[in-house]
Each structure stands twice: as C-alpha cells, then as structure tokens.
Image (tube, coloured by chain):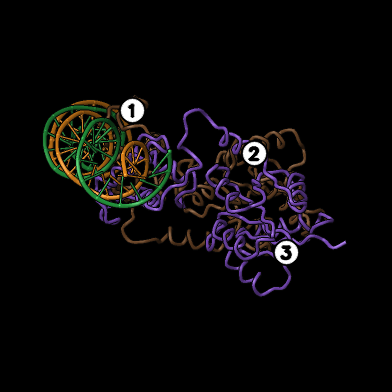
Chain colours: A brown, B purple, C green, D orange
Amino acid sequence: MKKHSVVIVDDHLLFAQSLQGLVNAFDEFEVLYHVKNGSELIKKLLESENVPDIILLDINMPVMNGFETMEWIKENRPRIQVLALSMDDHEETIIRMLRLGAKGYLLKDIHPEIFYKALNEVISNGIYYSERVATTLLNTLHGGNDNEVKNGKKLKDTELTFLKLACTEMTYKEIAQEMCLSPKTIDGYRESLFKHFKVKSRIGLVLYAIRNNMVASK
Amino acid sequence: MKKHSVVIVDDHLLFAQSLQGLVNAFDEFEVLYHVKNGSELIKKLLESENVPDIILLDINMPVMNGFETMEWIKENRPRIQVLALSMDDHEETIIRMLRLGAKGYLLKDIHPEIFYKALNEVISNGIYYSERVATTLLNTLHGGNDNEVKNGKKLKDTELTFLKLACTEMTYKEIAQEMCLSPKTIDGYRESLFKHFKVKSRIGLVLYAIRNNMVASK
DNA sequence: TTTAGAAAGGGGAAAAAGCCCCTTTATTTA
DNA sequence: TAAATAAAGGGGCTTTTTCCCCTTTCTAAA
C-alpha cells in the first residue's frame, strides 16, 4: 500500500525534524520533505512533480506566514489537504485559518495519538480540531450575549492598517499623515475599534491586537 | 557504556514526543521521561531516585515556567545540567536564563545536528548557545555606545510592578492608587522607564515589555 | 427613486499623558 | 563624617487622547 505523503512547513527545525520522525513512525504516513516557510514550500511544490497528500502548516513563520501560504495553496493546489499546526489558540487566528480552507487546526500541545487521529481524519476527507480549538469555536459560534459585532466580522483594510500603526509609538496625528487621512478620520477609526473590541484606551487596543495575533508582537 | 539520561520539560506534547525520538536516536543519549511543566518535573525529581544528567527546559509553560523551574533546580539539584530550549530570542530572556545557571540556550529553530553538538558540549561540562543567541549576547556585552543603563540592570520590584500595571487599561492615577503611591511618584517611574528602555510613549513601554517577555502577552 | 448607512471629516472640551525643574528625606559611599 | 545618590513627591505646563455631537458625500438597498 502506498503511504500517504506529508510535507511539513515549520521554521522550528528541531520540531520539524522531530515531527518527521514521529510521522514516519506511523505505518500509513511518510514525510516527503520539510521546509522552513511558505516561500520554500511554494518553490518545492512548483519544481517537484511529487504532490503531497497533506501539508502540516505552521502559522508563525518569519518569511511567509501560514495565512499567506494557505491562500496560495487554496488557489494553486486546492486538492492538497492542509492541517494547521500552531501554538496559538486565539479564536481570531483559528477562524481565519479555517476560513482560508484549512482542514483542521491542531495545537502543538496535543498528544501524539490525537495527532495520528487527525492525520487519518484529514485523509478520509474529514476535518479535525484539537479539543481546545473546538471549544473555542463553539464559544464563538453561539457565543455570548451582546457581541453582535465582536468576532467574525473582519476588519476593513484601512482599519487594519490603522490598527497596525496604532501598535506603534506614532501619535494619531502621525498615523493620519502616514495614511494620508485627516486626524479626525483616524479618530473615527479609533472610536470604532474601541467599541468593536470593547477596550477603553489605546493601550487596550494594542493588547487586544497582540493577544489576537492581529499584529506581530515579536 | 551507560547512556547520558535526558529529561524533557515542555508543554508541547507533540514537540516533546518528537524530540524524545530524536534524542533516543543519538547513541550516547536517552530520554528518561518527559513532563509538561516545572511542577511535574519537581514531583518526578523528588519521587524518583533516577537523577537525569541533562534537563531540556522550555521557558514558556503555562503552569510553572522555565525561570521558576530553573531556580528550583539550581537550589535543589545543582548538579543537573540544564539546557534552555525556547523560541524566544530576546536578550532579556536569554540573559535571565543564563544568570539563573542554564548551561546553554537553544532556539527551537536550530538544526538537529547543532542540537546534538549542544548535548555533547553540556555533558563535557561546557556551555552551548545557538548562533543567534551568541550574537545577541555579544551585542549586549560590549554593546552599542550610550546604553549604560539599558540592559543588564534589572528592574526594581516596584518598577516591575508599575510596568505590569502600565500594560493594562488602567490610567496612571489608578495605578498610583493600586500601588499606594502618589501619582507623581508613578510619573517618576514612568519617566525613568522611558529612558531606560528608550521609548517615547506608554505604547512603546507596553510593546517593549511584551517583546522582552517582561509581562505576559498572551 | 427615495432612504439608510457607511466613510471622511469638523468643533470643542475634558481627561490623561508626557515633560522639566524643584524639594525633602533617607541611605550609601568615598 | 560629608557628599552623593536614590526614592517619594510637588508645580506647572504642553501635547495627546478620548469623547460626543454634527455635516457632507457617496453608495447601496428598499
């Protein structure tokens, strides 16, 4: 029987290498190769005629991150199943990744047996989430009471740009200049995001953005 | 020949399990067991008469983090060599860990061969740093030009408390109340930390604190 | 074709943040 | 022991932030 081929995309070489060993230890799976980021993956996919069945995709990578990579895969290699693999359990991240078409979302603290189950599930065209991920999703779906704005709704480009600049030492005036908008417009974005995220100050905004992975914290 | 025994402390089970495979693949080393956090490690060390030669210690763990764990080890099991293993390459973190007595600091994106070298180095009583870690350290040691305050100097308790509260939606007035100090004193801390970290605003302070792991970001 | 609702922006004011320069009281340290 | 330094705090000022209410323009839906 031909084994299912797996490609690992993760910049943590130690983890990638170790994970490769783990995958190869499963009878039904074997690792084709592993790469350090999205760009390398794309290069490999383009030059190799050996198409993998599953891609294990890390999200936080320096060069080309998981989201961008996922978009590329969906457009160019839609038949490859992608399993997101991250330490980040914030719902914004999870939802974003699943919206982009990932077939599952695993946290790196899962048990290897769960990992094995996830691989099998994905191969048989299913979807798999870590328990904590599923819980998070449930909370989001029929979540809460008064958060009709809070989550799913994604930010507009301009709001996101503002948010990123707000997570900076720039004053609003400087941000306005940078974005070629009136300070008053910026003030509007600010108020709208404050309500959206239920925060009371720019500090709160920054904390929210970082905690939810909307801007790079490190 | 008896193999050198290794204990893995990491909450990412998938990583831990995979790493165990990697370590066991080296002839000279074998994994004794792996645990999810510092508390579990201590329990194991206390109840088992089988003392490991090396502990591979992750830093970011939910229950008892690497720093606390390192302190305990130095006090109670000073003869065990500890290799810190983290994705965090900020100098404050590295220096703190090495000050606490870690025999090396590895970033999780290192190559497995480097990992092997590090294990051997530590066993022969040496010290090993990832290349990027060494670079960071060098920059710090005879670093820069005018940063006589910047790094090594650790914050006083009260300053750290202020810093943590500053990474919050509280106003300075509220922080002052919380700390039972005059708002003017708080203002003094603020100014001093601004200079210390070379930031221009409270936002900058928050970003610095998070990036350097001085407050929990997530 | 109205009409509702975004998006961009204005006025104005109160609160908070940021900045210097200063005083007092301990605690070092030379 | 005298001088230096650190910790706590005050005065007073400017800039930023935060808030609320309002206008115009354009687009999309009823």
The residue that label 3 is drawn on is: B52
- Report the quarter where the N terminus of chain B lies: bottom right
Instruction: Choose between D4 and C19: the one closer to the eye.
Output: D4
- What residue is drawn where x is 77% and y is 59%? A26
Image coordinates of residue B89 in percent, x first then y, are: 58, 43
Determine the residue positioned at 76% across, 58% down.
B21
Q: What residue type is labelled 1?
A: Glu
Residue tagged 1: A174
In the picture, measured across the screen, residue B41 lies left or right of residue D10, that is: right
Relative to the observer, which residue lies in front, B130 or B157? B157
Indicate the secondary structure of the residue bearing disc 3: loop
**Gap between marks 1 and 3 measured at Cα:** 56 Å
Which chain is indicated by disc 3?
B
Instruction: Give the amino acid type for the residue marked by disc 2 in the picture.
Output: Ala
Same subunit, tags 1 and 3:
no
Secondary structure, mark 2, is helix
Residue D15 lies, in percent from the top left, at 25, 29
Does residue A157 appear in this view?
A: no
Which corner quadrant of the image does residue B42 belong to?
bottom right
Q: Position of residue A115 (x, y in %)?
A: 66, 60
Q: Name the residue under label 2.
A: B134
Cα distance between the residues tagged 1 and 2? 37 Å
The outermost residue toward the bottom is B47
Q: What residue type is labelled 3?
A: Pro
Q: Nearer the viewer, mark 1 or mark 2?
A: 2
